[in-house]
């Protein structure tokens, strides 16, 4: 099994920055990508950013140019640097480990990000 532990959320004013971290442990040989998803009440969890073990990244359109995902493979950790935060970035952020073909391997427990206007 794979375990994911997130940290770094909190409350920030619009225009501010936060950095989320997700550290993976366990049987990591099946993991081909780590990503961040956001969920707000009454809506489905949606992809924010993902990074593959190859280094390839992908972002949802509304965070491009503001968020950056990176990884430290030696520490099995992925980071999401969030700059110029907007109130609409508010939500619960979940780290997701994916396997071949995008298969779900594990979710983190989620971490709250609140951006005040």
Image (cartoon, grey):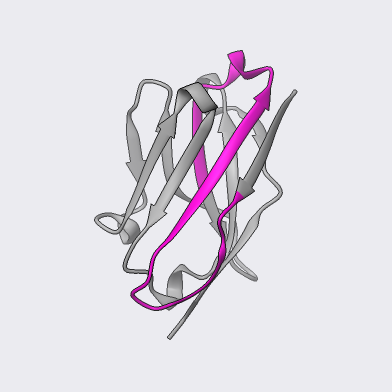
Horizontally, is 105 left or right of 51 in the view? right
Residue 25 falls within the magenta-colored stretch: yes
Q: Residue at x 36, y 20 (%)?
A: 54
Residue furthest left in the image: 65
Quadrant in the picture for residue 25: top right
For residue 96, side relative to residue 35 (left or right):
right
The secondary structure making up most of the magenta span is: strand
Q: From the top left corner, tell me how far across and down residue 59 is, in percent.
A: 35, 47
Q: Is residue 111 above or below residue 115?
A: above
Q: Residue lying at the far front in this picture: please name it.
A: 75
Q: Is residue 100 magenta?
A: no
Q: Residue at x 36, y 52 (%)?
A: 60
Relative to 33, say whether 70 is above or below: below
Q: Which residues are magenta?
A: 7-36
Nearest the viewer among 50 and 46 is 50
| Residue 114 vertical placement versus 46 (above, below) | below
Q: Percent position (x, y) of residue 79?
A: 46, 43
- At horizontal 51% and vertical 70% (from top left) the residue drawn is 90
Q: Quadrant of the N terminus?
A: top right
Give x and y (percent) for residue 36.
Answer: 51, 46
Q: Locate residue 74, reporting x and y percent.
A: 49, 22
Q: Residue furthest top?
A: 29
Q: Residue furthest bottom?
A: 117
């Amino acid at each position: 099994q794979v375990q994911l532990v997130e940290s770094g959320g909190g409350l920030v004013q619009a225009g501010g920055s936060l950095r989320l971290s997700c550290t993976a442990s366990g049987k990591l040989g099946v993991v081909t990508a780590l990503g961040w998803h956001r969920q707000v009440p009454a809506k489905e969890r949606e992809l924010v950013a993902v990074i593959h073990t190859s280094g390839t990244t992908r972002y949802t359109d509304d965070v491009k140019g503001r968020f950056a995902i990176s990884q430290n493979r030696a520490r099995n950790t992925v980071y999401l640097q969030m700059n110029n935060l907007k109130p609409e970035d508010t939500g619960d952020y979940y780290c997701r480990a994916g396997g071949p073909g995008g298969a779900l391997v594990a979710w983190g427990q989620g971490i709250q990000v609140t951006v005040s206007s």
